[in-house]
Structure formats: structure tokens, C-alpha cells
Image: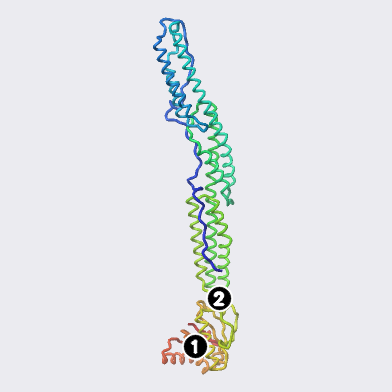
Amino acid sequence: MNLNGLKISALIEDVYDLAICINELTDLSKESNSNYVLPILDAELNATSCSPPTPESDLNNYRRNIEGYSRSVSNAINGIGARGLQMGEFTRARNNFVRYFNTLPSDYCIGSSNRDEFNALRNSISNGINQINRGINIFESNYSSYVNQAVPLLNTLNRESSRISPSSRDYTPVLLALSQYNSFASGYSLEIWNLSQQIENLSLTLSSALNSANNVFRRSFEQIEANVESESRKFISENTAAENAFREWENINGKTGYEKFRDIVVHVSRVMIPSFNSFLQKVPRTQRIQEAAGRAQEVVTHIESGYQAFPTFNKLPSPSTSFPYEKYGKDERKYGEQRLIDFLKSVSLTHFNDTGKKLYFGDMQLEHGGRISPHVSHKEGIDADIDPVEVGNVPNNNKTLALATAKRFLSGGARIVFYADEDVVNDANTWASQNNISGRLKKEDGHKNHFHIRL
């Protein structure tokens, strides 16, 4: 299997960053208790016929001040649009009007000389109160529209968030609901004052929906992060299995160990990575999630590098006139480095030309290396068991033919030749030393009926 890299995909873009959060309802303005507690307006002025009459200048001064505060209220109202929920300027103008009004005398001596001024004062007060009520009505309408749109969006967010469980692998419905609420709320700037009972009730409704959605959303967020971490840990389990397969390849059975490792790589590349990548495309970019994805990538890279480290040896070609030999044992054990194949071809042809007999090739190596029972060696693609059958078995072997065969192996480039006959070993090594050949025979009692050559 040719791998061009096993990659965990990049996370989705910043649109789903952790920075996205529920827009918190702006706190009710509470700079001080006096600002928050709206002063009460008692609009009654008591007029009686008494003496001396309230000075006209006082009444005119009261009226001019009331009109000034009333204009401030009117100006604040004129700036309110359909999305206007910045109640601060209006509320401060309203409070200034009321506070000034509450400083006015409650009892007046009114007669024919000052009645017009008194009526003008009352009209100015009435006009100011009407302006205040108009502003409150506008804010009640705007806020009601806002809450009536926000609450269903928050309820949707609450509902989608509550569906996230340990088995969830798609967070996009929650993110979509959150995005829809944020898109709506971002068009507003809130500064809410409890100007009326209706506004206070609306605030309670919105706060309840917001707090509920926020709490459930936060829990779901932590859950989806935990789910990504859980999915990431599955790669660690595969890595443990791969390490066990490698130990089996190295120490127990090279064929089954390699096949287990290969099956793990196939499962990781074809099943786990596509599934995990799909999952990552459906979750937000958070530090926990990025760290989990990073850990998964580290494991995948480790598994991939381990798989690519397995050798791939060349198969022993079929016999031919230029490569005369016979074989015994299983074909799956007849692989090696190309230089081993070239060595076997050379010595087989030389032996055939010298004796008219063919060498028999037994165990070499598995295609992808590893332990090949019952051998301790035969792991690196440079070992081969060779049986010149006419030599016979030690101690009833043809020493002359055995020595000649050993010399061919050393001349051909064998570094070590294992054989059980001590006389052949000694004579071959003496000959190699005399002829400046670096290879040597070693006595090995387990090789009585064949030679074991190592390049």
C-alpha cells in the first residue's frame, strides 16, 4: 500500500472560534441607586385663591425651566429609531425633568393677575409628561419586538445544545443556532432601564431565556470538546496495537506481525482519519480541540513512519538456465535484498558449472522482514539456507565437496557461513586467510545438512 501521508484535516475557519459567545444582555444601568430608582412624578399642582399671589416671575421661571427639561426629553426621543434600545439618554432627560418638577412648590396662590402664567406652567408640565410617556411607549414597542425575536432564537439554541451527548459527532446545529442569535443580536445596542412594568417584565423574560440558553450551551460546548478528545484517544489505542504488532513482527512471527500492522494502517487511513476529519469539520476551533487534533496527528505520523520503516525485499526469481537451482520450503520465505539474489544467482551458476548439480535454496526472508521461525536471524534480507544435497549430512558428509562449496560461497562474497563440520570450517578459513578473502566460516551445530550464508 502506497501512502502519501496520513493527515488530520485543518479545523474549520474562525467563524466558529471560541470567541463566539452568547451576547450578554447589557446590565441595567446601575451607576448608583439614585440613577436606577426612577424618581416618581406627581403631576398635581394645588392652586388656591390666597394672598399674596405667587409672583408671575416665579411661575415664568418655573415654566422656562420645565420647557428646557422637556426639550431634552423631546430631543432624546427624536433620536430613537426602530431598533432603538439605548434608553440611557432618554432616561437621564426624564429623570432631570422629574427631579426638577419635584423641587417645585406644590401649593400656589392663583388669582386673576397670575392665572395665565400658572396655566402656561401646567401646560408645559403636561407637555413634558406626554413626551415622557411617548418615549416610554416607543421603548416598550422596540423592546417587545426585540424580545419576541430573541427568545425563540435562544430557545432554539437551548434545544440544539441540549441534544449534544457523549455520542454526538456534529456540533453544527448548535453553531448555526448560535450564529443566528448572534447575527440578530449584533444589530442592536442595549441599555435597558426599567422605565415601566412592561419593560421590567420583558427584561425578566429575556434574562430567563438567555441564562437558560447560556448554561445549556456552555455544557454542550464542554461536551463536544470532550467528544473530540475521546475520538482522538482512539488513535492512541491504534498506536498501542501497532506497537504490539511490531513486537510480534520482530520477535514472534514476521508475517502475521506485518499483516496486523498493515491492517491497522488501512483502518486508520480509510476509516478513522476520514471519520475524524469529518468530525473536526463540524466542531468549533478551541484550544482543547486543536490540542486533541494535534495529539491524533502525532500518533498518525508515528504509525505511518513505523509502517514505512518495514523493509520490502525482492522475490527469488524462478529457476532458469542462467540461474540454475532447486528450492525447498515455502515460497513466502524466499525474499531478500537484491545483492543476496545476485549472490545466489552467481554461486548457483558456478556450482552447476563445476559439479553439474544444482544447489537447493531454503529459507531466506519474508517479503517484509521480521522473525521467521525457527530462525533467530534471517531478518535483514541477507541470509539464506543452501543445501548442496550431494554433500550429505554431518558427520556423514562429503568433506571434499563441502569444502569446495564453502570456498565458492566465500569467493562469491559471503561474510559468514555457518556449518556444523569443524574440519571444513577450519580448512575453509585457512584457505580464505591465505587468499585474502574476508569472509569466514563459523561452526554451528544446527547446520548439519545445509549451509547458512550471510552477506
Q: Residue at x 50, y 85 (%)?
A: 444
At label 2, the amino acid type is Glu
Question: Which element type, helix, strand or loop, lies under badge 1?
Answer: helix
Mark 2: few, some, or many residues within 10 Å (few <14, many ≥20)?
Answer: many
User: Mark 1 highlights which residue?
Assistant: 409
Mark 1: few, some, or many residues within 10 Å (few <14, many ≥20)?
Answer: many
Would you identify the image quadrant in which residue 107 lies? Answer: top left
User: Mark 2 highlights which residue?
Assistant: 367
Q: Nearer the viewer, residue 233 or 183?
A: 183
Would you identify the image quadrant in which residue 110 lies? Answer: top left
- Residue 188 location (% of width, % of height): 50, 36
Disc 1 vs disc 2: Cβ atoms closer than 8 Å?
A: no
Q: Nearer the viewer, residue 383 or 274?
A: 274
CA gap, disc 1 and disc 2: 24 Å
* Up-down relation of residue 316 to residue 284 (above or below): below
Which of the marked residues, 1 or 2, is nearer the chain's N terminus? 2
- Residue 216 location (% of width, % of height): 55, 42
* Up-down relation of residue 395 to residue 278 (above or below): below
* Up-down relation of residue 324 to residue 64 (above or below): below
